[in-house]
Image: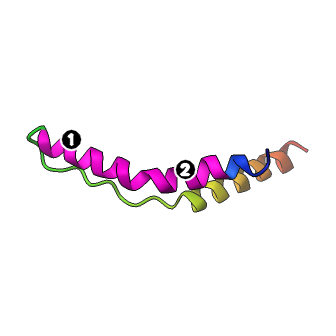
Amino acid sequence: DEQIHPYLLIECPRITFPFVRRVVSDVTRDGGFPPLNLETIDFLALYRNELARRAAEQRADA
Protein backbone atom coordinates (compact mmCIF):
# COMPACT_ATOMS: atom_id res chain seq x y z
CA ASP A 1 0.00 0.00 0.00
CA GLU A 2 2.91 2.37 0.67
CA GLN A 3 4.19 1.89 -2.87
CA ILE A 4 0.86 2.41 -4.63
CA HIS A 5 0.39 5.97 -3.35
CA PRO A 6 3.56 7.40 -4.97
CA TYR A 7 2.92 5.35 -8.09
CA LEU A 8 -0.58 6.79 -8.49
CA LEU A 9 0.49 10.36 -7.74
CA ILE A 10 3.84 10.45 -9.57
CA GLU A 11 4.27 7.74 -12.18
CA CYS A 12 0.74 7.53 -13.60
CA PRO A 13 0.48 11.28 -14.21
CA ARG A 14 4.06 11.40 -15.53
CA ILE A 15 3.28 8.67 -18.05
CA THR A 16 -0.13 9.99 -19.17
CA PHE A 17 0.62 13.74 -19.15
CA PRO A 18 2.24 13.89 -22.62
CA PHE A 19 -0.85 12.28 -24.13
CA VAL A 20 -3.24 14.57 -22.26
CA ARG A 21 -1.13 17.55 -23.26
CA ARG A 22 -1.35 16.52 -26.92
CA VAL A 23 -5.12 15.97 -26.77
CA VAL A 24 -5.69 19.40 -25.19
CA SER A 25 -3.53 21.02 -27.85
CA ASP A 26 -5.30 19.19 -30.69
CA VAL A 27 -8.80 19.86 -29.37
CA THR A 28 -8.22 23.59 -28.97
CA ARG A 29 -6.58 23.81 -32.40
CA ASP A 30 -9.36 21.79 -34.07
CA GLY A 31 -11.92 24.05 -32.39
CA GLY A 32 -10.52 27.02 -34.29
CA PHE A 33 -8.50 28.45 -31.41
CA PRO A 34 -4.75 28.74 -31.05
CA PRO A 35 -3.41 25.49 -29.57
CA LEU A 36 -3.29 25.50 -25.79
CA ASN A 37 0.19 24.27 -24.86
CA LEU A 38 0.35 23.05 -21.28
CA GLU A 39 3.62 23.52 -19.45
CA THR A 40 5.52 20.46 -18.30
CA ILE A 41 4.69 19.47 -14.72
CA ASP A 42 7.18 17.95 -12.29
CA PHE A 43 4.93 15.48 -10.48
CA LEU A 44 7.74 14.29 -8.22
CA ALA A 45 8.32 17.84 -6.96
CA LEU A 46 4.58 18.29 -6.38
CA TYR A 47 4.47 15.03 -4.41
CA ARG A 48 7.48 15.99 -2.29
CA ASN A 49 6.02 19.43 -1.60
CA GLU A 50 2.75 17.85 -0.49
CA LEU A 51 4.57 15.43 1.82
CA ALA A 52 6.55 18.32 3.33
CA ARG A 53 3.36 20.34 3.82
CA ARG A 54 1.63 17.45 5.55
CA ALA A 55 4.65 16.82 7.78
CA ALA A 56 4.71 20.50 8.75
CA GLU A 57 0.99 20.39 9.59
CA GLN A 58 1.50 17.32 11.77
CA ARG A 59 4.38 19.01 13.61
CA ALA A 60 2.25 22.10 14.15
CA ASP A 61 -0.65 20.02 15.50
CA ALA A 62 1.59 18.07 17.89
Residue that lies at the very extreme toward the left in this rendered image? 32
* Image position, residue 12 (x, y; %): 55, 50
Image colouring: rainbow
In the rendered structure, the answer to whether residue 27 lies left or right of residue 1 reads left
Residue 59 vs residue 30: left or right?
Answer: right
Residue type at numbered disc 1: Val
Q: Can you tell which mark lies on residue 10? A: none
Q: Nearer the viewer, residue 17 or 57?
A: 17
Q: Which residue occupies 20% across, 47% down?
A: 26
What amino acid does circle 2 point to?
Cys
State the quadrant of the N terminus: top right
The percent coordinates of residue 43 (x first, y second) are 54, 57
Q: Find residue 38 and report its image quarter.
A: bottom left
Q: Residue under circle 1?
A: 27
Let me know if residue 24 is in the magenta part.
yes
Q: Which residue is mark 2?
A: 12
Q: Residues within 10 Å of mark 1 (few under 14, many from 20)?
A: some
Q: Nearer the viewer, residue 32 or 48?
A: 32
For disc 2, the neighbor class at 10 Å (few under 14, some 14 to 19, many from 20) is few
Q: Which residue of the protein is positioned furthest toward the top in this rendering? A: 31
Q: Residue at x 75, y 52 (%)?
A: 3
Residue 17 % position (x, y):
42, 52
Bounds of the magenta segment = 7-30
At x 40%, y 61%, the residue is 40
Q: Is residue 45 above or below residue 8?
A: below
Residue 6: within the magenta?
no
Q: Secondary structure at mark 1?
A: helix
Decide which of tag 1 and tag 2 comes sooner along the chain: 2
- Classified by dominant secondary structure, the portion drawn in magenta counts as helix
